[in-house]
Image: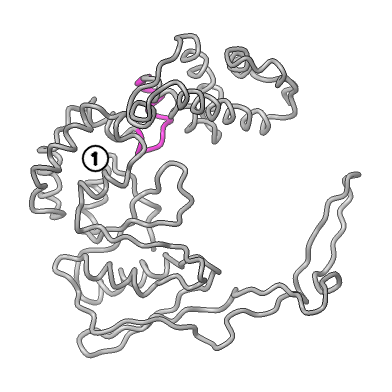
Amino acid sequence: MPNDFKPSTKELFKLLGWYDRQHFRDENDEVSRVYEVCIELSNRAYKEHSEEIYKHGTWTADQDLVDALREALVDHSTDYAAHFLAYTLLKYGCRRPETLARSHPWHHLMFIWHEEGHTATHVSQMLQEAGIVEQLPPESIEKINSWIQNPAFILDDHISIIFELFGPRVAFANLRDIGFEPRHDELFRDLATSAIPPISLNSISQGIETEERFKDVSETTELSIRNHDGTTVKYLISDQRAEGIGIFSDQDSHWVVQYMLNGETYQFLADCSGTWMDVEAVINHFNQLMDRLNRREQAFRFGMGYHENGEWGFFIVADRDRFPELARQLYIPLHLHFK
């Protein structure tokens, strides 16, 4: 087991003047420290540059700092610090292959298009051939070409890339609802509407399978507390809770989504999960519907952006074979495939 920071980490500490942060705990702590370095560099860039340059331009840095970040990227190529290091290097103007390889897929998209000589017109032709759009509008062509020429401008805005490329074909959903009622029915309806030709549902709604969604699980919920001496104490919530206070869960409860199509009624179940939508249930049933209708399309979810926690989802309904191949050719990140 290592007992000291890697040389690249020490060099970053020195360049930032962090002489009081030399106490090594473990490898996980070192990864966290490298992440803190990236955050500190971002904060300093915010103070040194205008808002326009900070968000859309290239930050200035001494070469020794860039070199130290590159060394750190080699040392942390397989942990979560890699994306932060790669992002910071991209902001400092480093376009080396190893930097692009470790950066987030949405971050390096336009850089790769630039390197491979793509133009917006060429991309538009590929989208047409895949049956996604008829033709990108002139304003989108102009905007995408500007991004290809200056990838740093769009580094933090993958949502604009999605909408400029796919426009009205995109279905958007808020996958988390603080009112504990994520709208599975609305996502299903929007997917049906975004298909070409659209699927006209006669009606659609959702409700809870049983009247009692949240159940008191205090009697069976066990917690563990780790003491300072390393020992662990386990106890049931029911033994410690104050009267009238309990832990409630909607695990094993289900949403029922019901809709009518061509005069027939269909329904599917989606797991209750607090504030979160059961996206997989919606997508899987939608794809089953497309199979029943003998249509080749299915729903795809675009990959999440940098720093996103999954609260928003961007989807498209497209040919089940041609669209994944198009996404591969254009380096467009997709979420994990559904069943």
Left or right: 103 in relation to 113 = right
Q: Is residue 45 above or below residue 120?
A: above
Instruction: Identify the image quadrant of the C terminus.
Output: bottom left
Left or right: 214 in relation to 321 = right
Location of residue 265 (image quadrant): bottom left
Task: Name the foreground residue: 138 vs 32.
Answer: 138
| Scheme of image coloration | one colour
Q: Is residue 241 above or below residue 33?
A: below
Q: Label 1's element?
A: helix
* Residue at 31%, 28% in the rendered image: 152
The percent position of residue 147, horizontal first and vertical second, equals 23, 33
The percent position of residue 66, horizontal first and vertical second, equals 46, 15
- Whether residue 100 appears in magenta in the rendering, the answer is yes
* Residue at 20%, 47% in the rendered image: 165
The percent position of residue 60, horizontal first and vertical second, equals 40, 16
Left or right: 285 in relation to 6 = left
Left or right: 76 in relation to 207 = right
Q: Amino acid at mark 1?
A: Leu
Q: Residues within 10 Å of mark 1 (few under 14, many from 20)?
A: some
Residue wearing tag 1 = 330
Instruction: Identify the image quadrant of the N terminus.
Output: top right
Task: Name the foreground residue: 339 vs 115.
Answer: 115
Main secondary structure of the magenta stretch: helix
* Residue at 44%, 78% in the rendered image: 269
Location of residue 310 (image quadrant): bottom left
Location of residue 189 (image quadrant): bottom left
Q: Is residue 258 above or below residue 54?
A: below
Query: What residue span does the magenta drawing correspond to?
Result: 94-107
- Whether residue 330 appears in magenta in the rendering, the answer is no
Q: Residue furthest right?
A: 229
